[in-house]
Image (tube, grey):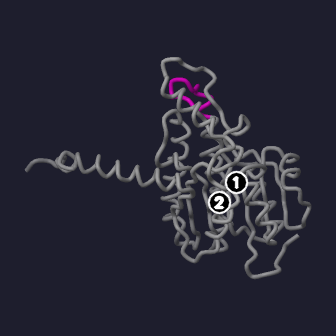
Amino acid sequence: MQNNNTENTKTWFITGASKGLGLSLVKQLLASGQNVAATSRNLAQLVIAVGSTADNFLPIEVDLANEDSVGCALHQTKKAFGRIDVVINNAGYGIGGSIEELTDKESRDSFDVNVFGTLNVIRMVMPYMRYQKSGHIINISSIAGFAPGVGWSVYAATKFAVEGLSTVLAEDVREFGVKVTVVAPGAFRTSFLTPESIVIAKSRIDDYQAVGASLERYLGYHGQQAGDPEKAAAAIINVAYQDNPPLHLLLGADAYDRAMAQLEKLDKEFRFNEELSKSMAYSA
């Protein structure tokens, strides 16, 4: 099953591959002759979406919240292709509503996929990458993980977690020759804003008018997002071939503008309280 046609051939392990950015990634990689292991919660849906039976394509049904399921999928990938060069932790979904409106289960379920699924993949793939002394882990976050919007508190929390763990992971695995990139996309024209990819709090509270208006506005963007997922996929693939890939990568003009505005806001807040921040030492 292994494809070693060119020295540029890599083996890619991509989660959340049956739709959206993940599907774009898989199709572009297969078209260029790469070895691709792709995961989804629904194997049949994945196979139909990708539409390929090529030897360099390994579709796998995986429960990312289950460490054993993840470990088995990575073992299958290594057995099929001989190595694992690039992992793209793309699986995840949006969750909207105020903290008070979202239930404990709704919140924990989102962390299971958006955060703990990512951790499971990293934990299970690192033994392979440490042995190889090479690899690249690419975690898909969101601009909400740095500059969140009203009504997306729990979603932002999951993506802040991805940003944070990626930053430290890069330092932790550097000595093994493993690289890390965390990607923060803005709004791209995928299925992200459809009911199959987003959860809205079932228990809504009328008092949260700003939250309700924000959710309605965001959901109304479906099909009108400015970002092209094919361009995003190509950019992410290109990063994996760079000798010195970025740790943080913003994708989309909206993501860039929001990040710069957030940086300016944080700079003003930190500097405004500089005197207080520095006055915490014990007095002589």
> Residue lying furthest top in this view?
206
> Residue lying furthest left in this view?
284
Q: Are marks 2 and 1 in contact (CB under 8 Å)?
A: yes
**Compared to 202, does 254 lie above or below?**
below
| Between discs 2 and 1, the one toward the N terminus | 1
Three-letter code for the amino acid on which mark 2 is drawn: Ala
- Where is mark 2, residue-wise? 232
Quadrant location of the N terminus in the rendered image: bottom right
User: Is residue 237 covered in magenta?
Assistant: no
Residue 242 pos. (x, y %): 60, 75
Q: Provide the secondary structure element on which disc 2 rests.
A: helix
Q: Provide the secondary structure element on which disc 1 rests.
A: helix
219 left or right of 78?
left
3 left or right of 102?
right
Residue drawn at x 89%, y 60% is: 52
| Badge 1 density bin: few <14, some 14–19, many ≥20, Cα 10 Å | many
- Where is mark 1, residue-wise? 21
**Compared to 49, does 103 lie above or below?**
above
Residue drawn at x 84%, y 66% is: 80
Closest to the observer: 135 or 176? Answer: 135
| Badge 2 density bin: few <14, some 14–19, many ≥20, Cα 10 Å | some
Residue drawn at x 63%, y 73% is: 134
Does residue 43 show up?
Answer: yes
Residue 190 pos. (x, y %): 70, 48
Closest to the observer: 262 or 270? Answer: 262
- The stretch of residues the image draws in magenta is 97-108
Three-letter code for the amino acid on which mark 1 is drawn: Leu
92 left or right of 251?
right
**Compared to 240, does 275 lie above or below?**
above
